[in-house]
Image: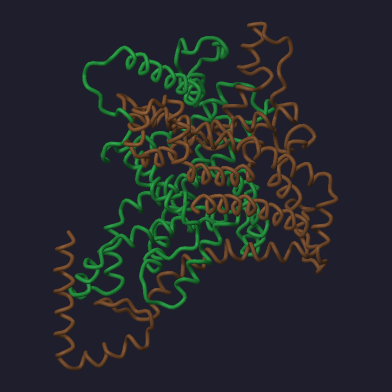
Chain colours: A green, B brown
Amino acid sequence: MSTTGPAAAKAAAQAAAEAGTQAVAGAGPEEPAAGARKPKRYSRRVIVGLSGRYLTLCLMLVVLVGPIVWQFLTSLKGRGENVYEGVLPSDPTLDNYTRVAEAFPLFQYVGNTLVVAALAITSNCLFAAMGGYALSRAGWRGRKTVFTVLIATLMFPFESVMISMFLTVREMGLVDTLVGVWLPGAVSVLNLMIMRAAFLAVPKEVEEAAVLDGANEWQRFRRVFVPSAKGALAVVCITSFMGAWDDFLWPLIVLTDSDNYTLQLGLKTLAGATTVNDQRLIAAGAMAALLPMLLLFFALQRYFFRGVGEGAIKT
Amino acid sequence: MAQIAGTERGAAAGTRDAGRAAGPPRARRARRPKKETGQEPGLVHRRWWTPYLFLLPGLALVVLFSLWPFVNTVILSLTDAQILRGGGFVGFDNYVRALQDDTFWLALVNSVVYTVVVVPCLVFLPLALAVLVQKKIPGIGFFRSAFYTPVIASAVVVGLMWQWILRSDGLVNTVFQKLSLISEPVPFLTDSTMLLVSAMIVTVWKGLGYYMVFYLAALGNVPTSLYEAAAIDGAGPVRRFFSITVPTVKPMMLLVGTLSAISALRVFTEIYILGGESGGPGGDSRTLPFLIRQVGLGFAGETGYAAAISILLFLLTLVFSVLGHRLSKGDEN
């Protein structure tokens, strides 16, 4: 591994990636937690400790998930219901969702977001895989230089280059277009690094076997390397989708016409009491943006957590 | 596994020798290593330009949308360019102007205070949370995933949710007034200081689960035997935490500190959603990214000046990165 980043950070990132996967998939080796396995007969002290632990867990659950659940329940409340009183809606209705879709072009915003997301997923998977493949192969000039430059770009916070980025996009005539929203994030360095790491893990023998079988470089990449890095590709897919779905500041800068708004940008019209003063509508709008992401998260959890660990390379 | 690999390598070497003995390919193979220095030994040979071809699209995009904008920002910061016209070289005038600009100092102080408050919270609270969910007890998987949900939510969604919790007619104020804890609504979103505090709360709330995952990984590396030995020596849980857990996860604490500092310096969306487009009442809650956008864009956008502020923001994040790096290096020695 020839890298320039802080060694400690890197080791930590790897550890995070590993344990992150294990923690959620539950398939990893037993964590060396103190007293993970106790004999069946519990002493009183253990029972007290355990119930204290569960109590704290539930308290944190209320703090961290409570607002989301409560917002969701608010979005189901009918017009006549008091939004301050009672947690559960007495008469659950999807009325607010239809109303929010009427109040502003929700589906158009979702459509725009999906266009950006589809472009981002495609370009990130393709270019990050190709670039990561080249970076993982030894024996070409400038490899170290390219790698150093890529790592260096991770140091630039988006906020400090966004003005110049806007000028570049403007010169390309892409202001107020969805392509303009997508293009600067078409490939992220982080994804390149994730793919590089995945390809480095492919045993040399596999590659050599493919060479013996007469596969050319593209065939080796396409038929040997990409299939063996499916997990990393899934991470790239998810992070690109999440990025496109959740991004706010860049679309805010590029897009002016509200017809082109992405979902998050559209949601800002819900902020501020002046435009909409119905919490049920605001809740419905927020939930419309959150629920698809949440479903994705619960379906593909382990990839989300792997993304976190590998994202730690950032420093 | 190692044995199998060894066998294959042996077989591969055998084939290569056979190829050399055969004649014509020998000359070609023998010449290659001289031409391409650093060529990996073995069977895999490629044309010299293939890696570049693979790298081209990705690298082009990174250069165009990351490297060039940075270089361009440095250049622009030395000019008086505006959004609708290019500018002439003015040296460090923009930087001098920034240092004399009250608005710049306001944004700088806001950003730094924000970072200084948020970072300790995001270094210690997620560690406590990780310790809480580390032990494998029934249902812990559910709690771990659930604690991560605020991370999944976008900043806009989180802002909208908290906006209503904190509004003057929002949940907290209504409940507190009903309980007669307060007579006047607390101005969470209408007072510039309170707005920053609110944004800090939201940032910490959203970041807890994210950094918890980092710490879970680090905690997995603490050897069990240490705990057992300490328990035998009579160390209680608190003592064990501070004498064993904290030293072991210290590198991770530094990493989390650095990451959370950089992201705190970049805060924008939370304040935009909670405080509105102007950045709070009178724009008094503006942070540096807020200011960059306001100064640099729009019809009268002063790109040169905004670029200078951008570079100052970059330097600020660099300070925190270097600090984190230094501290972790000092730790290793």
Point out residue A298 in the picture as x, y percentages from the top left corner. Answer: 36, 34
**Quarter of the figure with residue B148:** top left
Residue A172 sits above or below residue B199 on the image: below
Quadrant placement of the N terminus of chain B: bottom left
Name the residue: 49% across, 50% down: A116
* In front of the other: B292 or A289: B292
* In front of the other: B9 or B88: B9
Name the residue: 63% across, 56% down: A175
Name the residue: 59% across, 21% down: A279
* In front of the other: A231 or B11: B11
Name the residue: 32% across, 76% down: B40
Q: Is residue A42 left or right of residue B96?
A: left
**Quarter of the figure with residue A99:** top right
* In front of the other: A67 or B23: B23
Question: In the orientation shown, which residue stands out farthest toward the front?
Answer: B233
**Quarter of the figure with residue B109:** top right
Point out residue A274 in the picture as x, y percentages from the top left corner. Answer: 70, 27
Point out residue B328 in the picture as x, y percentages from the top left corner. Answer: 53, 50
Residue A214 sits above or below residue A275 on the image: below
Q: Is residue B277 left or right of residue A151?
A: right
Residue A62 sits above or below residue A272 on the image: above
Point out residue B203 in the picture as x, y percentages from the top left corner. Answer: 58, 34
Residue B224 sits above or below residue B296 on the image: above
Numbered marks: total: 0
